[in-house]
Image: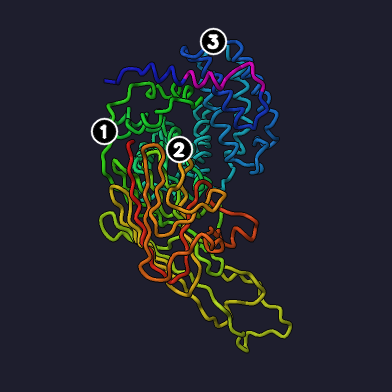
Amino acid sequence: MPSPLDHEFVRAAALAADGSADPSAEFVEPHRALARRVKTLVAAYRSPESALHGSERAVAAALTHLRALRSVQTASGLFAGGDNVQSPPDSAFTVNDVCDAHVLAAGAGPELADVTAALAEIAGAATGALLTGGVHTPNHRWELSAALARLHRSFPDDRLLARAEEWLAEGVDIDADGLYSERSAVYASIVTNPALLLLAEVLGRTDLVDVVERNLTATLDLIRPDGTVETVHSRRQDQRMPFALWPYLPHYRLLAIRTGRGDFARAARLAAADGIHDPDLLAQTLLTPDLCRTLPAPDAERLPRDRYLATARLAAHASAAAHTVVYGGSDVPEHRRIRSGLACNPTFLRLFAGAAVLDAVRLSRVFFDLGPFRAAHMERLGDHRYRLTQTLTSAYYQPLPKDRRRDDGAYRLVDEGRFSAAMAFPDRPQDEVSHTTRVDVDLRDDGADLRIDISGPTVPWALELTFRPGGEPQGAVPLGDGRWCMTTEPLTYRVGDDEIRVEAAVETGEPLAGPDRSDVLRYDPGQDYTVAGGTDATTGNRVYLGGHGPQTLTLTLRATSQA
């Protein structure tokens, strides 16, 4: 027997929609925003819980936005605007909302006849381009396929289904741990999961629901105490920023209701803990009525718990006192470049102790300007114990062999991994210089123990601890500009009743650098950033320890939280 309706949830969704769908406001917006606003206005018109239910002003506003939307639709049927020119996938985002709005408007009667006709005209004009168009990111395949399925839902055409099935025949890019290939919370929650759920519904593909359930299951252990989802391992833009849980709300809620999973119900409640602010949720409740039903009883949080995602090389340990993340899955060591679409974040540890948060631990080495430590390997040594390792190698090149010399001196321009020059590097004998960094991490219920071993030639290094604003490091020497120097004295970072305590000791090598060594106590992003005048540096309260390797350092991190 279906669960009863959750009227409070529907009212909250309607309130969020009403706040976004003000029909008296004038907007000059990109095509995707225009389509989303039309969809929200039509949903508000249809919903008895909305202040705009049956409102003629909502209809008039929708028609105004539709005229604006049609005006930015080019002769190809694709929409103008944005940095992706003549983009089928970018237009697919808009068409998905256009088609949803069409379903809602077509079921509303003659009052929305003009809106229905305008939506059909826009959808029809875009159909040809989406039927034959291509993509350039993994998630685009599923967004475009969802648009084809939605077009077929409203305007049946077997060619649309065949094209969607052609994309799906490539196989959904989900790995053994339940992560999509982009490893991105943004694209999983906003693009891939909703697209696959729609395709499952239209095509009758229950296997696609199973894919989404696997991804949501993996995400459970990536939910952080501050209500965000871990993104350090992402290959997209969100690897550099926090991402809130709330975009996952409709997917956790829907599958919790349909499967009875209490862990999904708990995640859905967490996603709505700060209220419902997504204006699109109202339309989703009308299109997928199961969303309106009451959630099953949520499971209690299980503590302590551990998860190791071997495919992303990311470990998480959660307890009542601390939530710690260790990461060694960067793509940079293999590809030897910083690039959009690669996991580049050099943060290898985070620690949450209630309001006291150590957002990032990073390690710089001045070695041929090749950038900070990014583990090439992550090994699970045992319960709660991990080893991160990276060996950097650069070279000096010998004269060319006689048979490779040219009288004109015009040699090939080659990139040798850190530098490009017309020197035919692969043809030359080389003398290699190597540098190895190893970090052993022992995760504890109250924090972590680290042992950092820096071997190879003598080079400066700096460990950077970036704390989230809200407190101030005690026991470290202020350097100005939000920076501190830590020596062997303990450091305490307190926010309210929550605290992170750090102690450092040198096992082998020279003493730590003092606060006068600004040349050592700094973060170096490496030449891939600096050659273009850029950086991936953190912001916040940054504490530095530094010295000259070879060196072995131990670090203890202890969390005390009243959360």
Against 399, residue 317 (above or below) is: above
Mark nearest the camera among 3 and 2 is 2
Against 84, residue 529 (above or below) is: below
Q: Amino acid type of disc 3?
A: Gly
Quadrant where the N terminus sits is top left
Q: Amino acid type of disc 2?
A: Ser
Tally the marks.
Answer: 3
Kindly give the residue lying farthest to the right in the view shown. 408
Whether tag 1 and tag 2 are in contact, CB under 8 A, the answer is no
Q: Looking at this view, is 292 or 249 the one in front?
A: 249
Mark nearest the camera among 1 and 2 is 1
Q: Residue at x 60, y 10 (%)?
A: 56
Please tell me the numbered disc located at residue 54: 3
Horizontal arrangement in the rendering, residue 528 relative to residue 277 (left or right): right
Mark nearest the camera among 1 and 3 is 1
Does label 1 or label 3 sit earlier along the sequence?
3
Quadrant where the C terminus sits is top left
Q: Looking at this view, is 44 or 8 the one in front?
A: 8
Against 366, residue 106 (above or below) is: above
Against 437, residue 361 (above or below) is: above
- Which residue corresponds to mark 1? 300
Q: Residue at x 60, y 76 (%)?
A: 425
Q: Secondary structure at mark 1?
A: loop
Whether residue 171 can be seen here: no
Please tell me the numbered disc located at residue 189: 2
Q: Amino acid type of disc 1?
A: Ala
Task: Please provide percent x and percent y for residue 525.
Answer: 55, 58
Task: Please provide percent x and percent y for residue 187.
Answer: 49, 41
Identify the magenta region: 14-26
